[in-house]
Image: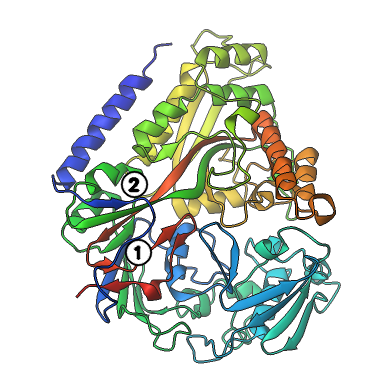
């Protein structure tokens, strides 16, 4: 078969360069790699900030029920976590502080006077209500995993108990939470977003995620509250005058859905003030003299997953045979030129990775510790496919499976307004076709895509995915055999044991290096079994007009929006 990858990538980059040149200019921005936007004077009050997003929010505006990044863009303004995290991703008190002597029993103390946006004071009852909601058998979200380790939560979940025994209210501002056993990350894994008991009074758990309290009139404890929603277009936020950390400086924030192809023009014309942006726009945004760029190492990664089984409602079951052959999966990894692909589509902001742990996390294994580097080697991929029985038996240039049946890689990728998504999916398909694997690409609207993945839609077999890993580096919630978000449905007892041991205080104690080694061993196993091909980790980038001040970014996101201000 003829090699067409370089020609295809060159053509794609030429098209993108012409596309971006039409949107950009020869002006220059300034860039910060320490995550800080320096202010020229003290904070000023007032003004409207327009915040750009490239994907319309799905409209689930409550942390307890949302499931995608587009909604989290809104939630960062309207609700606060009980805890916060520093630049080293260590938990710090926010609304609540805590103490523990044994990593099993924790006592949390709430700040007094923190109010919901409906005027009601936040108390520990609202947190208990949230935890009970997530543990309810009718809860339709993915976060039971964040409360299941509380003592008595499984019995409550299964309808065998009327309360969660591990929740002990001391008073309105103090609660004791007991876990089923000591773990290193009980705190980091715990769900710390309360739910207003008063606001959801009388609403059945199974109806909550679709209720007006979530979709149309959400409330939180954050610095801004939703004033108006124009579905698919914009969301108007007004400042919360009674915000517990003080009145926000900016009076109004407009979250505006902007086609990625128009973002550069909007930034140049000052019709967008602040926006995260994709790597495809990086070179042209750097040329704008009215823009500052903030850049930070991210906590996200992209991967190509293989469907290996199904979700039975409680755990993953390895019952899908097409991609069970490890040598097939490894060969498909060697067939992808990840360096070339990252350069073409992530413009210097994407970096090949061999593990599902971003380098910014302290548990990340060094490449030298992993059994396979998966550097581009199409000849090795072909040899492995031959040895595994995937051969071209009918002479059409494409391989059949070991039984002689037609073999087609059905590859799925999500679609937004980003103009590179379909091109990058087709490029991966091209790599596989060059080693003889016939590949069909299907593009699906982003919000529908992840719903199909979660529900195990049979049309999705090999798929492009990505995760933002958050503050806790433990990957159990994404890759353990009983994890809902383990979309490949990978089931592996050795994997589960390594992940469990890394959290067991009786095994690792307070020895961080011992815990890291268990995670390194897990990454070695993942790298060898390759239930998914890690393909890239990204730097996070944000564009701000120079009138926007007080913004800081870290691998976990921005500082609180109540600290931002606009230079008048």
Which residue is most to the left?
Answer: 26
Q: Pointer 1: residues within 10 angstroms few (<14), some, or many (20+)?
A: some
Q: Residue at x 47, y 49 (%)?
A: 298
Q: Residue at x 66, y 22 (%)?
A: 327
Where 157 sits versus 378, above or below? Answer: below
Which quadrant of the view contains residue 493?
top right
Residue 463 seen anywhere in this rendered image of the structure = no
* x, y percent for residue 164: 80, 75
Where 261 sits versus 110, above or below? Answer: above
Relative to 346, 480 lies left or right:
right
Residue 496 seen anywhere in this rendered image of the structure = yes
Q: Earlier in the sequence, mark 2 or mark 1?
A: 1
Where 362 sits versus 550, above or below? Answer: above
* x, y percent for residue 255: 33, 68
In the picture, the quarter occupied by the N terminus is: top left
Q: Which residue is disc 2 drawn over?
A: 418
* x, y percent for residue 172: 68, 90
Q: CA distance from mark 2 to mark 1?
A: 16 Å
């Amino acid at each position: 078969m003829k090699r067409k990858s370089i020609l295809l990538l060159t053509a794609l980059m030429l098209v993108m360069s012409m596309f971006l040149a039409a949107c950009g200019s020869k002006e220059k921005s300034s860039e910060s790699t320490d995550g800080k936007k320096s202010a020229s004077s003290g904070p000023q009050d007032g003004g409207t900030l327009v915040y750009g997003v490239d994907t319309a929010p799905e409209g689930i505006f409550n942390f307890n029920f949302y499931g995608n990044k587009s909604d989290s863009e809104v939630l960062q303004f309207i609700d606060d976590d009980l805890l916060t995290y520093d630049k080293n991703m260590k938990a710090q008190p926010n609304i609540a502080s805590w103490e523990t002597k044994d990593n099993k029993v924790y006592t949390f103390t709430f700040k007094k006077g923190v109010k919901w946006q409906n005027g009601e004071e936040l108390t520990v009852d609202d947190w208990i209500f949230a935890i009970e909601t997530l543990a309810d058998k009718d809860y339709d979200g993915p976060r039971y995993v964040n409360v299941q380790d509380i003592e008595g939560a499984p019995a409550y979940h299964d309808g065998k108990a009327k309360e969660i025994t591990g929740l002990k209210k001391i008073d309105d501002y103090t609660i004791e939470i007991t876990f089923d056993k000591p773990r290193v990350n009980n705190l980091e894994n715990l769900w710390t977003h309360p739910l207003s008991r008063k606001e959801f009074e009388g609403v059945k758990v199974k109806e909550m995620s679709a209720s007006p309290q979530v979709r149309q009139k959400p409330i939180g404890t954050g610095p801004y509250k939703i004033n108006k929603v124009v579905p698919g277009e914009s969301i108007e936020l007004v400042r919360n005058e009674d915000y517990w950390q003080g009145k926000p400086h900016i009076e109004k924030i407009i979250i505006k859905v902007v086609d990625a192809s128009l973002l550069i023009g909007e930034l140049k014309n000052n019709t967008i003030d602040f926006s995260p942006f994709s790597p495809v726009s990086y070179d042209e945004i750097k040329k704008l003299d009215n823009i500052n760029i903030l850049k930070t190492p991210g906590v996200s990664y992209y991967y190509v997953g293989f469907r290996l089984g199904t979700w039975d409602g409680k755990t993953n079951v390895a019952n899908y045979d097409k991609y069970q052959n490890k040598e097939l999966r490894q060969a498909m990894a060697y067939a992808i030129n990840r360096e070339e692909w990252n350069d073409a589509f992530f413009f210097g902001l994407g970096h090949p990775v061999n593990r599902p742990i971003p380098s910014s996390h302290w548990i990340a294994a060094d490449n030298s510790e992993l059994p396979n580097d998966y550097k581009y080697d199409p000849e090795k991929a072909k040899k492995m496919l031959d040895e595994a029985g995937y051969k071209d038996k009918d002479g059409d240039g494409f391989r059949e499976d070991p039984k002689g049946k037609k073999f087609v890689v059905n590859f799925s990728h999500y679609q937004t307004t980003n103009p590179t998504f379909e091109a990058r999916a087709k490029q991966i398909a091209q790599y596989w076709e060059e080693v003889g694997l016939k590949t069909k690409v299907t593009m699906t609207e982003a919000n529908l895509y992840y719903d199909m993945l979660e529900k195990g839609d049979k049309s999705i077999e090999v798929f492009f995915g990505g995760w933002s890993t958050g503050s806790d580096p433990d990957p159990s919630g994404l890759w353990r055999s009983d994890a809902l978000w383990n979309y490949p449905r990978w089931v592996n007892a050795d994997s589960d044991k390594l992940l469990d041991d890394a959290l067991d205080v009786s095994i690792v104690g307070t020895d961080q290096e011992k815990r890291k080694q268990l995670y390194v061993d897990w990454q070695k196993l993942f790298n060898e079994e390759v239930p998914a091909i890690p393909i890239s980790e990204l730097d996070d980038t944000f564009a701000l007009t120079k009138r926007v001040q007080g913004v800081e970014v870290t691998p976990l996101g921005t500082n609180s929006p109540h600290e931002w201000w606009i230079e008048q």
